[in-house]
Image (cartoon, grey):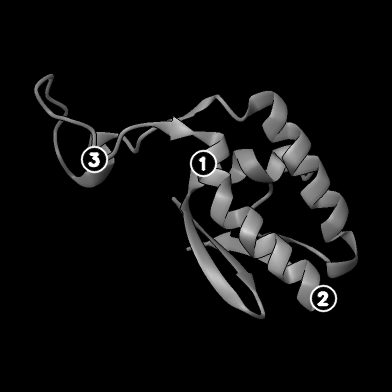
Amino acid sequence: MLVKFSTRNGQLLMQGEPAVRLVKLGGHSGTVPSAVLAADLPAFAAKLRSGLEQHGDELSPAPPAAAAGRAEDENDEPRERPIKLRLRAVPLLDMVDTAISQKSDLLWEKA
């Protein structure tokens, strides 16, 4: 699953599991689709940053090989290496900061 984040200023696609994890770190239930209203975004951003201080070094799993339409084989490399949640969060935090400055809502849905 992919999750598409949207504001009136742009869109961002992210793998589903890390996207839901980041939304939960921001204090949301993790429901897809959903939204955070402009008035609530500063608190969401603060909770997300606080959550990343505690959990930012956790690895975000790489998409499974089977999801790419390949049979799993011990010689197969993952499509991408797992990276830290802190790094996964950078584009989302940039989007949230822009949405706050533009007084825009943040919405997300399955892509």
Residue 67: image quadrant is: top left
- Residue at 79% across, 72% down: 101
- Say what amino acid the circle numbered 1 marks: Leu
For label 1, the crowd category at 10 Å Cα-Cα, with few meaning under 14, some 14 to 19 and many 20 or more, is: some
Position of 1 relative to 108 (above/below): above
Residue 79 is marked as: 3
Query: Looking at the picture, how far across and down is residue 75, in whole percent?
Result: 9, 22
Query: Looking at the picture, how far across and down is residue 69, in whole percent?
Result: 18, 45
- Say what amino acid the circle numbered 3 marks: Arg
Query: Looking at the picture, how far across and down is residue 19, in whole percent?
Result: 56, 47
Cβ atoms at labels 3 and 1 below 8 Å apart: no
Of residues 69 and 62, which is closer to you in this image?
62
Mark 1 lies on residue = 87
- Say what amino acid the circle numbered 2 marks: Lys
Residue 104 visible in the shown view:
no
For label 2, the crowd category at 10 Å Cα-Cα, with few meaning under 14, some 14 to 19 and many 20 or more, is: some
Q: Earlier in the sequence, mark 3 or mark 1?
A: 3
Residue 103 is marked as: 2
- In the orientation shown, which residue stands out farthest toward the right? 39
Which dot, 3 or 2, sits closer to the camera?
2
Q: The residue tagged with tag 3: helix, strand or loop? A: loop
Q: The residue tagged with tag 2: helix, strand or loop? A: loop
Q: Earlier in the sequence, mark 3 or mark 2?
A: 3
Of residues 60 and 31, which is closer to you in this image?
60
For label 3, the crowd category at 10 Å Cα-Cα, with few meaning under 14, some 14 to 19 and many 20 or more, is: few
Which dot, 3 or 1, sits closer to the camera?
1
Is residue 35 toward the left or the right of residue 71 in the image? Answer: right
Q: The residue tagged with tag 1: helix, strand or loop? A: helix
